[in-house]
């Protein structure tokens, strides 16, 4: 393997490149106010936690975390609850126009958010969904459904039909066959879909900004964006808040890492 | 009481009709084999019996009860699938228990049944493993176990041995037969392997193009095939088949296929008068011998083309007047290729209009 060093170099570059901004704000979050604004910049933090204290206590940052958890969690649960039976049906039933349904879903996912922003706002206004969590969960669910359905359809498709038939003959109804046999086997797909949905809802900014104007209900990305004061940018607090915002995602992804890798490589190798 | 009864089953997928007017009956405890080439509809028929597929027309009865409107879970059947279909996330024990659990059987009974089945199939040691930790043969046993443990009214097998290697297939075949003798439950077994069909079945149902070609005991199917398809499908190497016509003269009956002629030392006027004379003549390789025989055999001379030595016997390919003739013979004969030799045919099968016609004995 003569090009091994080259490959390794490439990997290193990609990892460093994508980690760089993250690394910078992690470092910044542990600095003191003087160090944050020092010129020339200092690299190493002086190990203070003042920004965390200030962000979490003074600026009550945790309630943004709570709001985000509610919205992202709600979106994930509802999206999967709807996507699972839909994907199962698309993978198994002899439906006319199945390809069109799947293609249509993909098209829906391609609209830029700004195109649907107006209608979504109007609909939510009529329904009384503005400034509520469910008002944000609703569009999130419809925006994440296509991806979830696609991932799960691929998964169900790969599971042998014989298993389901065996379950039927062993005494299962169609629903029982789905949740006793097919769902456990599609677990990697469920994890993948769940985590991608969760990440989307956790990070989404545009609709959150549009729909939630009440600071009590705003989610993390909006909270961070509106954090800046009138005359100064509190870089330190922003960095601390961003670390707090990213941490849950990292923990979740690390926890379910195996499941996600299995999920993303589905189709490449037979399960 | 009939174990299984099918009445005029028809099945169409879209515009394609895959089963035509299939009727058959299996007695209680009988072992029925559905035999045919791939695409003949045998698996579809099995799936209709299981309720996994709905018939377009016709009726299915299991144990004397019509099950047309009964979904698979309530048909009291068990099925062994070609690819075993063991639940990968459950251990062998949980796989065996699954069907009983779904039917709400008490723990004690489930435990006892699993012990009984494990003993019968000798799979004690595997009970706590997952299916992927088992070899193909072991998976096969577990798949059978999962069917047996439920004690159903009817067993369905969909080419269960086709994924095993040749040796294992032979031993599993014997075990399956033993199992049937011990359980005495009605079984329907789909295969394209004639050896499995011949050795396992009380009755064989030969199918082709969605139609039943013949139903009969194995020896009946072999000795009295109902039509040229059955004749050609059963037997290994396959029957020699000659298409030709009959002619009658003073010396007797003559069959002519191209340059090749067979002269039968008897007259059978009714045979000829009935038809245009066109017919199919079949000769089993084992009904031809290369050792000199008396006049009750018909002698033909050809040249040796090729010899396949199988150990316990040899397959000799002869060229006879532009037609090939396969002969099964005992090994040890010195048969150099290209040499001329006389073959003696002991027995013929005659088909007119695709139907078997018994030949008068000479």
Image (tube, coloured by chain):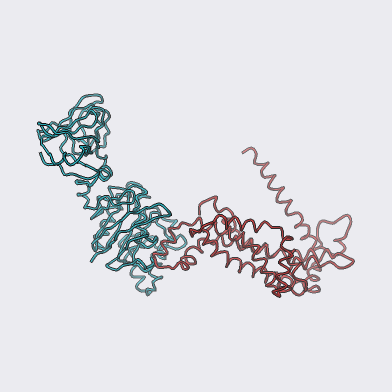
Chain colours: A red, B cyan
Which sits in the foreground, B81 or B273? B273
Residue A257 visible here: yes
| Near-viewer residue (B143 or B201) | B201
Image spot of residue A250 (x, y percent): 67, 62
Residue A197 on image: x %, y %: 64, 63
Residue B160 visible within the image: no
Residue at x 71%, y 49% (from the top left corner): A14
B177 with respect to A92 (left or right): left
Q: Quadrant of residue B227?
A: top left
Quarter of the picture containing the N terminus of chain B is bottom left
Q: Nearer the viewer, residue B252 or B110?
A: B252
Q: Which of the 4 image quadrants contains residue A199?
A: bottom right
Residue drawn at the location 61% of the way across and 57% of the way down: A104
Q: Is residue A264 above or below residue B336?
A: below
Image quadrant where residue B105 sits: bottom left
Residue B220: x %, y % from top left: 20, 49
Q: How far across and down, in percent of the image, does residue B215 sit? A: 24, 53
Q: Specify the quadrant that holds the C terminus of chain B.
A: top left
């Amino acid at each position: 393997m003569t090009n091994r060093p080259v490959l390794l170099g490439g990997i290193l570059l990609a990892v460093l490149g994508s980690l760089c901004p993250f690394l910078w704000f992690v470092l910044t979050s542990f600095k003191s106010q003087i160090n944050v604004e020092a010129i020339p910049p200092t690299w190493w933090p002086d190990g203070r936690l003042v920004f965390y204290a200030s962000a979490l206590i003074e600026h009550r940052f945790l309630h943004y975390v709570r709001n985000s958890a509610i919205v992202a969690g709600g979106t994930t649960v509802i999206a999967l609850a709807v996507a699972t039976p839909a994907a199962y049906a698309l993978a198994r039933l002899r439906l006319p126009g199945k390809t069109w349904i799947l293609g249509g879903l993909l098209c829906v996912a391609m609209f830029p958010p700004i195109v649907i922003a107006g209608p979504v706002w109007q609909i939510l206004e009529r329904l009384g969904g503005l400034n509520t969590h469910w008002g944000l969960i609703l569009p999130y669910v419809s925006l994440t459904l296509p991806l979830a359905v696609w991932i799960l359809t691929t998964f169900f498709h790969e599971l042998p039909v014989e298993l389901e038939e065996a379950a039927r003959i062993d005494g299962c109804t169609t629903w029982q066959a789905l949740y006793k046999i097919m769902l456990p086997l599609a677990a990697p797909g469920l994890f993948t879909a769940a985590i991608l949905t969760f990440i989307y809802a956790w990070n989404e900014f545009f609709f959150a900004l549009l729909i939630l104007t009440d600071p009590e209900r705003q989610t993390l990305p909006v909270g961070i964006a509106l954090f800046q004061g009138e005359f100064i940018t509190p870089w330190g607090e922003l960095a601390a808040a961003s670390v707090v915002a990213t941490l849950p995602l990292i923990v979740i992804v690390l926890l379910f890492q195996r499941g996600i890798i299995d999920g993303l490589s589905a189709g490449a190798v037979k399960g | 009481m009939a174990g299984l009864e099918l009445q005029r089953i028809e099945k169409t997928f879209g515009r394609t009709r895959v089963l035509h007017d299939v009727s058959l009956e299996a007695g209680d405890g009988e072992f029925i084999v559905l035999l045919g080439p791939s695409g003949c509809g045998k698996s579809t028929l099995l799936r209709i019996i299981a309720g996994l597929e709905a018939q377009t027309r016709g009726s299915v009865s299991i144990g004397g009860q019509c099950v047309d409107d009964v979904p698979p879970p309530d048909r009291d059947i068990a099925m062994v699938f070609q690819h075993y279909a063991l639940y990968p996330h459950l251990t062998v024990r949980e796989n065996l228990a699954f069907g009983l659990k779904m039917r709400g059987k008490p723990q004690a009974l489930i435990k006892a049944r699993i012990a009984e089945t494990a003993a019968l199939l000798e799979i004690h040691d595997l009970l706590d493993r997952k299916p992927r930790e088992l070899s193909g043969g072991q998976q096969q046993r577990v798949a059978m176990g999962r069917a047996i443990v439920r004690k159903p009214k009817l067993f369905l097998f969909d080419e269960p041995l086709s994924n095993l290697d040749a040796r294992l297939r032979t031993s599993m075949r014997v075990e399956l037969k033993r199992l049937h003798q011990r359980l005495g439950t009605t079984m329907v077994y789909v295969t394209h392997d004639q050896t499995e069909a011949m050795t396992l079945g009380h009755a064989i149902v030969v199918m082709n193009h969605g139609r039943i070609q013949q139903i009969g005991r194995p020896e009946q199917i072999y000795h009295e095939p109902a039509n040229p398809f059955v004749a050609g499908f059963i037997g290994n190497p396959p029957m020699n088949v000659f298409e030709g016509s009959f002619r009658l003269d003073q010396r007797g009956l003559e069959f002519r296929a191209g340059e090749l002629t067979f002269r039968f030392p008897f007259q059978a006027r009714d045979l000829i008068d009935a038809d245009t004379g066109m017919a199919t003549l079949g000769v089993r390789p084992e009904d031809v011998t290369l050792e000199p025989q008396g006049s009750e055999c018909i002698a033909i001379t050809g040249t040796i083309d090729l010899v396949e030595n199988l150990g316990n016997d040899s397959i000799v390919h002869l060229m006879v007047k532009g037609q090939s003739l396969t002969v099964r013979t005992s090994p040890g004969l010195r048969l150099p290729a290209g040499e001329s030799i006389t073959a003696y045919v002991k027995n013929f099968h005659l088909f007119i209009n695709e139907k078997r016609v018994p030949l008068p004995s000479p």
